[in-house]
Image: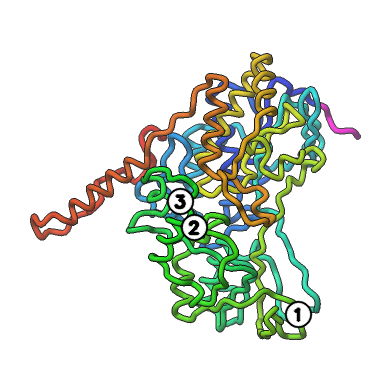
Amino acid sequence: MPPASIDRTDRFCIIGAGPAGLAMAAALKAAGVPYDQVERHSRVGGLWDIENPGSPMYESAHLISSRTMSAFAGFPMPATYPDYPRHDRVLAYLRSFATAHSLEPGIEFGRAVDAVEPHGGGATVMLGDERRTYRGVICATGTNWDPLLPEWPGTPQAEVRHVRAYRSPDELRGKRVLVVGLGNSGADIACDAARVASAAYVSVRRGYHFVPKHVFGTPADVFAHSGPRLPRWLETPLFGLLLRLLIGNTRKLGMPKPDHRVLESHPLMNDQLLSHLRHGDVRLVADVERFDGGEVVLRDGERLGVDLVLLATGYTKRIPYLDPAHLDGSWAAGQLLTAFSRKYDSLFTLGFAEINGALFPHLSRLSALIAQVARAELHDPIAAERFLKWLRGTSFDLTGGRRLIPTQRHQHYTDEHALEQATRRAFRRMSWTWPSEPNILYQELFILLQNTLADLSLEGDEPRDRRPARSESLPTAAR
């Protein structure tokens, strides 16, 4: 029996209810654009929900951008959160955002999309026994779902699996563990292994630059945003010198000399790994060459006897329900402004770019831009056509002028400042209103100044809470 055809060309379809999908739903709702939203899981949260089948989340996972810089526009994270919240607090924040904007009643849970077919008049979404046609579709299911699996000669006797299947340090207890890859997930799991494994190794192909999570007691991204914007020719060497002073020479810890300058690759933010390396709880080793019986043979000739090999080797950037033929070549660089298609007015991809900063603020801005375009497509098609023509004829350098190392991960890499400026440029082009963004950064710096003055005060000996009393829950504006 053919699927039932349903005409929904008066509205848009959002696929996914993770951070990107929630930001998009809130933006469309604020713009008065009708939409449907489908989510294959039973709750909102996307990959931040450790119970979501296929989620790469693990117990020790934390945000690598600070809570100050990581919030959606106009919806700060609770002040009681630590500087770098754990995954369960991020999930709680996302669910609070959904509740505050009354998004959950509009989500069809347990609905997996089989296929999306964009065309001139809209986009067709296949949902089981339904064939729905929408004015447009926003793919917001994100990345980090499909592991990238390297292959080596030989047959391993050790257990080998991707870190997407990793959850708890209990899996490592008493084992000889080799983590392959030193992205931020690999570094986290190496720290878990350092605490409970009988031996812990990390295989690296190249050297990396460590960025501390705090600089002079302030979250690194807050510190970076609190000063003036420096020209690129000065920023890179100055920041490199600062890191050398703060961290020291990591080659003494076994790290190969980096083949790139600082900021030319995704930063490695993990103070704990530095501590474990200095204490000898984990050891950096060379790239894997092959398996030989019960041993892993490295490129420098060293042989390791291990029980478990965890592949922190990244993920493929793909949208499983969308034929890659629909994604033009610009998608390798994140598409136009990371969200728009050169081929179809009806296709948007949100949350697939890799950003060298906090993601959620950019999701808010790009969602607001998509929502304005969606409203124009429904009510002012001439304005929508004018904007898309300008967008497709405009060149955007979203690298921020950085010469990034040529890896698969950096094909989608985007400089946060370049993306923000390009997005502002798009809003100005159409005289659309920029989304409200309270200056949380200055609020946090003011609190830091208050606390510093309190520390310097010599009045009284009674202990006191150094942070001004603030609500345990989300701000009043968000409740």
Tell us which disc is closer to us: 3 or 2: 3
Name the amino acid type tagged 3.
Answer: Glu
Q: Which residue does the numbered mark 1 point to in the structure image?
A: 291
Within 10 Å of the Cα at label 3, are there few (<14), some (14-19), or many (20+) other Cα atoms? Answer: some
Query: What residue is at 55 percent from the left and 29 percent from the top?
Result: 368
User: For the magenta stretch, what is the residue range?
Assistant: 1-5
List x then y, in percent, for residue 81: 39, 51
Who is closer to the viewer here, 20 or 473?
Answer: 20
Rendered view: 198 above or below 81: below
The alpha-carbon separation of the residues under discs 2 and 1 comes to 33 Å
- The secondary structure that most of the magenta stretch takes on is loop
How packed mark 1 is, by other alpha carbons closer than 10 Å (few <14, some 14-19, many 20 or more), is some
Name the image quarter holding the N terminus: top right
Position in image of residue 433 (x %, y %): 49, 23
The residue identified by callout 3 is: 235
Quarter of image, res 186: bottom right
Front-most of residues 407 and 10: 407
**How did the renderer colour the structure?**
rainbow
Label 3 to label 2: alpha-carbon separation = 27 Å
User: Which residue is identified by label 2?
Assistant: 62
> What amino acid does circle 1 point to?
Phe
Q: Is residue 293 left or right of residue 372?
A: right
Q: Secondary structure at mark 1?
A: strand
